[in-house]
Image (cartoon, rainbow, N blue to C red):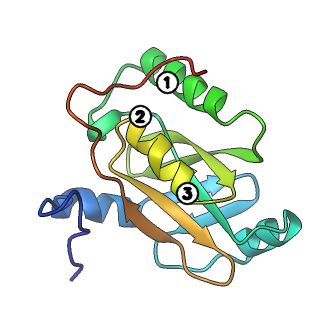
Amino acid sequence: MTHALPWHGSHVLPPRLLLAYRRTRYVAGSVAVAIGERSAAADALLADHAARTAVLLTAWNPASRRMPAGWNHRMQQAMAAWLRGRAVVAGEGAWRRWREAHLLVIGGVAPMVGLARRFRQHAIVVLARGRPARLVAVTPPARGACATTAHS
């Protein structure tokens, strides 16, 4: 089957959570993505922006714990505020009854790992031109860290 994705040293994502990430289908604009599969639409979008990579991420349901819709929307807006000035396409990730708003952000991966960590997410989806989409684990934030609704 699949191997657990390394997460924060010796920690790994639980197998059921890893399976859910891998079965989720992500759509942003005309780009449809599945983990482990290449997307011609993603390649075209990256080429249009002269970029090599993009990232799908969300602020919804931190640590995979379901949160109220209003809270999720506020956190997604806060994440969008952090991304002002970047090329972003609104999207969604869905599997079975689980649905979350996502943002497809054109550009480098490292800053998006930090942003996902700030919003207490387990992983992000990385798109690289000509390659299959891959799941990248995000180490948890330091104890006591939490998402903020504004940035400087």
| Amino acid found under the numbered disc labelled 3 | Tyr
The quadrant of the image that shows the N terminus is bottom left
* Residue drawn at point x = 30 percent, y = 31 percent: 66
Is residue 144 positioned above or below 53 on the image? above
Q: Residue furthest front?
A: 152
| Amino acid found under the numbered disc labelled 1 | Met
State how far apart marks 1 and 3 are (Cα): 19 Å
Residue on which disc 1 sits: 75
State how far apart marks 1 and 2 are (Cα): 8 Å
Provide the secondary structure element on which disc 3 rests.
strand
* Residue drawn at point x = 23 percent, y = 67 percent: 6
Q: Earlier in the sequence, mark 2 or mark 3?
A: 3
Provide the secondary structure element on which disc 2 rests.
loop
Q: Earlier in the sequence, mark 1 or mark 3?
A: 3
- Decide: marks 1, 2 in contact (CB < 8 A)? yes
Residue on which disc 3 sits: 26
| Amino acid found under the numbered disc labelled 2 | Phe
Q: Earlier in the sequence, mark 1 or mark 2?
A: 1
Is residue 7 positioned above or below 90 on the image? below
The quadrant of the image that shows the C terminus is top right
- Decide: marks 1, 3 in contact (CB < 8 A)? no
Quadrant of the image occupied by residue 47: bottom right
Identify the disc placed on residue 119: 2
Is residue 31 positioned above or below 41 on the image? above
Provide the secondary structure element on which disc 1 rests.
helix
Q: Residues within 10 Å of mark 2 (few under 14, many from 20)?
A: many
State how far apart marks 2 and 3 are (Cα): 19 Å
Is residue 24 positioned above or below 128 on the image? above
Front disc: 1 or 2: 2
Quadrant of the image occupied by residue 132: bottom right
- Total numbered labels: 3
Q: Residues within 10 Å of mark 1 (few under 14, many from 20)?
A: many
